[in-house]
């Protein structure tokens, strides 16, 4: 049933993108929003990765914003010490700026839009062996397309509020197969673990 959610998301994406583009074109703050156009290549999966000759594998670490990047700094350091190439993606530009300060990271990028062509383009370029999501950035295409390619997926520092839990239950028929394939969910609390 996950395919139904992915199909719906892919069919609705062009309409959402058109609405955002029209809002941008007719916005009185158009000049203030202009830097967003520079983000489009990254949002469509274009990431520049430099390969490390000594790397034992590539890990894609996804964080929503600067707070999650800060929370993952120790994990990044541990992975770098194990000779992993780390690619960090963030949802926000501020998160990306913070991730660029992490030592040993091979690449930093804004996360691809959760749209099959964008995620596939990112996966083609990044070729990760593992995807680690920090906290609760549950993007269906990010997870499903990574899993389809054999990428090991995990969530660390995971949290799920009671409110989020009630919302996710509405589409549990679609999320359960994805979450059931996660290699690891390291939750913040016992209550979060139970909700997952």
Image (spheres, grey):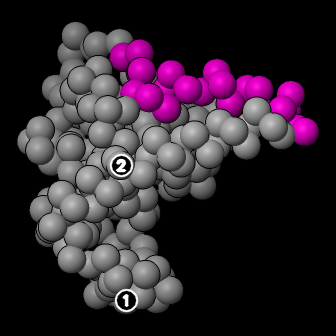
In the rendered image of this protein, does residue 99 appear above or below residue 37? below
Residue bearing mark 2: 11
> Which range of residues does the magenta coloring cover?
28-49
Q: Position of residue 117 (x, y in %)?
A: 32, 32
Q: Is residue 36 above or below residue 142?
A: above
Is mark 1 in CB contact (under 8 Å) with mark 2?
A: no
Return the residue nearer the eye: 119 or 3. Answer: 3
Residue pictured at 57% horizontal, 40% vertical: 18
Tell me the quadrant of the picture where the C terminus can be found. Answer: bottom left
Sequence order check, earlier mark of 1 and 2: 2
Q: CA distance from mark 1 to mark 2?
A: 35 Å
What is the quadrant of residue 165 in the picture? bottom left
Q: Nearer the viewer, residue 149 or 102?
A: 149
Q: Is residue 159 above or below residue 89?
A: below
Q: In the drawing, what numbered circle is on residue 115?
A: none
48 falls in the magenta region: yes
Residue 115: x %, y % from top left: 37, 42
Q: Residue at x 43, y 81 (%)?
A: 167
Say whether residue 92 is visible.
Answer: no
Residue at left offset 44%, top offset 46%? 13
Q: Residues within 10 Å of mark 1 (few under 14, many from 20)?
A: few
Above or below, 106 against 99 in this view is: above
The quadrant the N terminus occupies is: bottom left
In this image, 111 relative to 8: left or right? right
Rendering coords of residue 162 (x, y %): 46, 89
Label 2 environment density (alpha carbons within 10 Å; few <14, some 14–19, many ≥20)? few
Q: Position of residue 7 (x, y in %)?
A: 26, 53
- Residue on which the image places disc 1: 191
Label 2's element?
Answer: helix
* Residue at the image point whose x is 37% and y is 89% from the top: 191
């Amino acid at each position: 049933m996950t395919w139904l959610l992915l199909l719906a998301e892919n069919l609705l994406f062009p309409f959402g993108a058109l609405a955002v583009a029209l809002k941008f074109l007719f916005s009185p703050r158009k000049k203030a929003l202009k830097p967003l156009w520079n983000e489009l290549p990254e949002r469509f999966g274009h990431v520049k990765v430099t390969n490390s000759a000594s790397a034992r594998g590539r890990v894609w670490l996804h964080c929503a914003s600067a707070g999650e990047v800060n929370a993952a700094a120790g994990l990044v350091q541990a992975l770098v010490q194990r000779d992993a190439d780390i690619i960090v993606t963030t949802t926000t530009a501020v998160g990306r700026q913070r991730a660029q300060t992490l030592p040993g990271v091979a690449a930093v990028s804004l996360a691809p839009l959760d749209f099959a062509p964008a995620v596939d383009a990112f996966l083609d370029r990044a070729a990760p062996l593992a995807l680690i999501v920090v906290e609760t950035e549950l993007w269906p295409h990010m997870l499903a397309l990574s899993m389809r390619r054999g990428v090991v997926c995990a969530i660390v520092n995971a949290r799920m509020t009671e409110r989020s839990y009630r919302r996710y239950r509405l589409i549990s028929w679609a999320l359960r197969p994805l979450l059931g394939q996660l290699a690891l969910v390291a939750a913040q609390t016992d209550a979060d673990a139970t909700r997952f």
